[in-house]
Image (cartoon, helix red, strand yellow):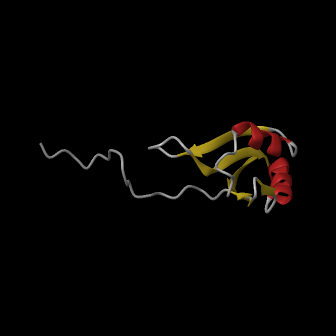
Amino acid sequence: MTKRIYVGNLPYSATEEEVQELFSQHGEIISLAMITDRETGRFRGFCFVEMEDDAADAAIEALNDQEMGGRSLRVNEARPREDRGGQGGYRDRGSRW
């Protein structure tokens, strides 16, 4: 089984390679998603890392509150995504024509 890890408070200058290097010390990374702003394309300071359960637990234990680029990382198991109620984007409201 795998776990998805939330990594917050990353420096805005952090690269995917730096995050991979940091987490790969604790096991194999299955996926890594660096979150960027839709409008500007700039990194938003957080990402999601997916790893096997044991590796994820080890990474969370070792990296939570560790400093990177002068910032204290927030590393924990990601919560399920909440339904935002269709804000933005297209949503079919039924045909009126």
Residue drawn where x is 36% and y is 46% of the image: 89
Measured from the top left, where is residue 7 in percent x and y? 70, 54
Residue drawn where x is 86% and y is 53% of the image: 58
Is 18 in front, or is 23? 18
Measured from the top left, where is residue 47 in percent x and y? 65, 48
60 lies left or right of 78: right
Residue drawn where x is 74% and y is 36% of the image: 17
Residue 1 in sight? no
65 lies left or right of 38: right
Query: Which picture quadrant has residue 13?
Result: top right
Residue drawn where x is 87% and y is 46% of the image: 26
43 lies left or right of 69: left
Query: Which picture quadrant has residue 27?
Result: top right
Measured from the top left, where is residue 49 in percent x and y? 71, 46
Is 74 in front, or is 84? 74
Residue 48 in sight? yes
Measured from the top left, where is residue 51 in percent x and y? 77, 44
Is 22 in front, or is 95? 22
